[in-house]
Image: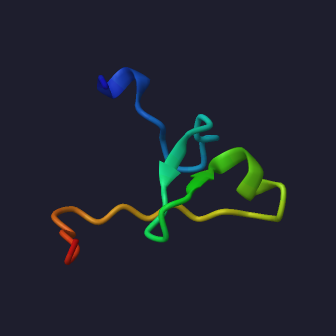
Amino acid sequence: MSAASAVGVGDRAPDFRLRHTFEHDVGLAETLERGPVVLVFYVFDFGSR
């Protein structure tokens, strides 16, 4: 992703789906239906899996 296309602070993130720790998918759009969402990214956060 180039800096020109990166999401900035306060911008709306594009919808995406991720695999949750408990082996089910989680989508941004359906999570937003329940209320505000805060996205936090950890660099080099390697789990025990």
Q: Residue 36: where, in percent of width, then height?
A: 74, 63
Look at 58% across and 41% down and name the residue there: 13
* Relative to 49, residue 27 above or below: above
Residue reaching furthest front?
A: 23
Q: Residue 21: where, in percent of width, then height?
A: 43, 69
Which image quadrant for residue 11? top right
The answer to which of 16 and 10 lies nearer the viewer is 16
Q: Residue 29: where, in percent of width, then height?
A: 72, 45
* Relative to 31, residue 4 above or below: above
Look at 66% across and 63% down and name the residue there: 37
* Relative to 32, residue 15 above or below: above
The colour scheme applied to this rendered structure is rainbow
The answer to which of 46 and 12 lies nearer the viewer is 46
Residue reaching furthest bottom?
A: 48
Quadrant including the C terminus: bottom left
* Relative to 47, residue 31 above or below: above
22 lies left or right of 1: right
Quadrant including the N terminus: top left
27 lies left or right of 45: right
49 lies left or right of 4: left
Look at 60% across and 55% down and name the residue there: 26
The answer to which of 15 and 21 lies nearer the viewer is 21
Which image quadrant for residue 45? bottom left
Look at 59% across and 34% down and name the residue there: 14
Question: How many numbered badges does the structure rendering display?
Answer: 0
